[in-house]
Amino acid sequence: MRSEHEINRAIELHANTVRRLCMIYLKNYADTEDIFQNVFLKYALNSVSFANLEHEKAWFIRVTINACKDLLKNFFHSHTVPLDLIMEQPIEIPPDYQDILEAVFSLPQKYRDVVYLHYFEDYTAPEISQILGKNVNTIYTLLTRSKRILREKLGGDKYEL
């Protein structure tokens, strides 16, 4: 079990990454908070040591992705209606980003993963390949295809990818 100091340090360093990744997968604030708590609880109870901060960050990304996938596979999750749809209270997002976020959220999951890791977390293709356990050339292909899809959805050269 980790000390309170280690847990607080990890939360300061990785909270934004975990939350953003959850939002990309789950598109739901409540589920994001649940997964956030589960990931950091797992970290607190886990005694694995990391070689460096990048190794630790990669661990958080992998655990978060797996937790999101597990939640999405859950029977009750797939057979309920989110309160967001019932309440119909829109999230305040600047108009410039609304189109981009909608386009990214509409991508198939395999593209969403690489787009998030590359553009939001600034990972290189070789680093993404290690995190996702895929071939580097596959990552380059997924990035190229996702750029093309996003360009089509966003209306050509309006946005620089």
Image: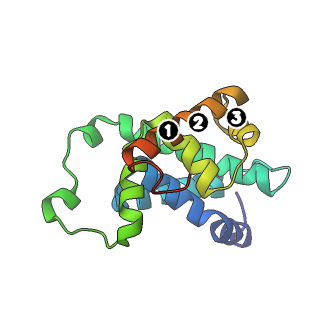
Q: How far apart, in angstroms, are the residues tagged by discs 3 and 1?
A: 20 Å
Residue 46: in sight, yes or no?
Answer: no
Residue 48: in sight, yes or no?
Answer: yes
Q: Amino acid at mark 3?
A: Ser
- Is disc 3 placed on a helix, strand or loop? helix
Sequence-first disc among 3 and 2 = 3
State which quarter of the image contains the N terminus: bottom right
Q: Position of residue 43 (x, y in %)?
A: 64, 54
* Left or right: where 129 falls relative to 160: right
Quadrant of the rendered structure where residue 10 is? Answer: bottom right
Question: Vertically, is 96 above or below 154?
Answer: below
Question: Which residue is found at the position 57% from the left and 65% from the top?
Answer: 16
Residue 39, labelled with which disc?
none
- Is disc 2 placed on a helix, strand or loop? helix
* Marks 2 and 1 in Cβ contact (< 8 Å): yes
Q: Residue furthest right?
A: 51
Q: Amino acid at mark 1?
A: Arg
Question: Which residue is found at the position 71% from the left and 70% from the top?
Answer: 9
Residue 129, labelled with which disc?
3
Question: Which residue is found at the position 62% from the left and 43% from the top?
Answer: 62
Q: Position of residue 81 (x, y in %)?
A: 19, 49
Q: How far apart, in angstroms, are the residues tagged by discs 3 and 2?
A: 15 Å
* Left or right: where 117 falls relative to 92: right
Q: Which residue is mark 2?
A: 144
Q: Which residue is mark 1?
A: 148
Question: Vertically, is 112 above or below 89?
Answer: above
Q: Amino acid at mark 2?
A: Thr
Q: Position of residue 19 (x, y in %)?
A: 50, 60
